[in-house]
Image (cartoon, rainbow, N blue to C red):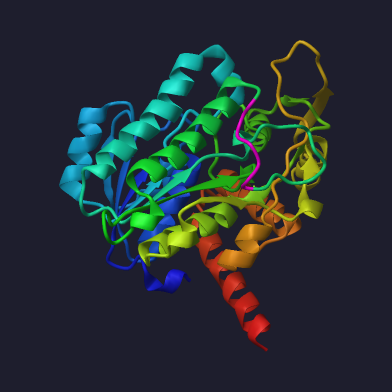
Amino acid sequence: MFNNIYHGKRVLVTGHTGFKGSWLSLWLQHLGADVCGYALESSASPFSHWDLLKLDMRSEIDDIRNLEKLKKVIAEFQPEIVFHLAAQSLVRRSYADPLETYTTNVIGTLNLFEACRRTDSVRAIVNITSDKCYENQEWHWGYRESDPMGGYDMYSSSKGCSELLTASYRNSYFNPSDFSTKHQTLLASCRAGNVIGGGDWAEDRLVPDLVRAVADGRSVHIRNPNSTRPWQHVLEPLSGNLLVGQKLSEGCVESATGWNFGPAKNRAVTVREVAEQFRRYWRDVELEFTTLNNLPHEANLLQLDCSRANALLGWDAVWDYNVTFDKTISWYRDFYEHKQVNTAADLKTYLDAFNSSCTAEKR
């Protein structure tokens, strides 16, 4: 995968202590990259996936809003490829603290771009945002990369702003038409739907809430059970992110744009269906479904159109929803019942499935 582009490369991952960032860091090391992480300490509870992995890599613990420290780390490490995941990533938390959300997700992103612009080694930057960056009209079809940015709540609008910032920064400083003459850097953004997988203990997320409820022997309250989300295993969008990073590193100017990564439309399911399937795998959990009118607004229907990534990047999901759910719940069960951390094993299984699908296509 990825044309061996990451082997021996210096790669910076912001947000490496988070759920997606820790999976990405492991994968990059598997690909032979020299990885440096920059992030706050993990706030996950009761466990941190990053701490459980115990990766042997440089880890800088600081705030993405600390521009001077960020510039210092980047100047020292001289990354060639940068993946930006550091963010305030929770919708309901954004209602409680909009200032933190905007300064982290917008100014923090600007800080990273500025530090990279002043570092000659940087060849590729991938800003990983969210499907919530789109102006959500509650459509029954997927949003395309050309649809307007927006967002009802503070988190979603901050991600829309991050996307607008990425586009304007690319036009102003890393314009693809000037690549290899005025600059040597390509900048892209990637949007993904709801991800699940082993090792996520972040607050206010469905699967971590269900897992904590089982561990604590209590029921879990499911809000907005009829909301539909494009659930996918964390490795699926990360494979897309890595593919974009590869294309940028190879100088493919057409890839310096926004990309969607998510499951096919027929794989989008409701919150209720996810919770009830969880109970079929792990019967100890008790579910209480509630639909309250006084809760902060959250999108009910949200899907992505990934046909552009399918056609132009050759990207497609490897695991269907049933395999995704089986791998996720098995990870947690093995962790709680046997103290096993199956992240590396799941990555290997995923890669084996990818290779098998490629072999089948060639026949």
Q: In which quarter of the image is residue 160?
A: top right
Task: Say which residue appears at 71% left-offset and 19% top-offset.
Answer: 297
Q: Residue furthest top?
A: 294
Magenta-colored segment: predominant secondary structure: loop
Q: In which quarter of the image is residue 48?
A: top left
Front residue of 5 and 174: 174
Q: Can residue 168 be seen in this view?
A: yes
The x, y position of residue 94, in whole percent, is: 55, 19
Q: How many labels does the image show?
A: 0
Front residue of 190 and 178: 178
Q: Is residue 316 visible?
A: no
Q: Is residue 302 left or right of residue 194?
A: right
Task: Say which residue appears at 80% left-offset and 38% top-offset.
Answer: 139
The x, y position of residue 270, in whole percent, is: 80, 39
Residue 64 drawn in magenta: no
The x, y position of residue 344, in whole percent, is: 48, 59
Q: Where the C terminus falls, by quadrant? A: bottom right
Residue 149 drawn in magenta: yes
**Which contiguous range is marked in magenta?**
145-151
The x, y position of residue 263, in whole percent, is: 70, 54
Front residue of 82 and 143: 143
Q: In this view, does 208 lie to the left or right of 129?
A: right
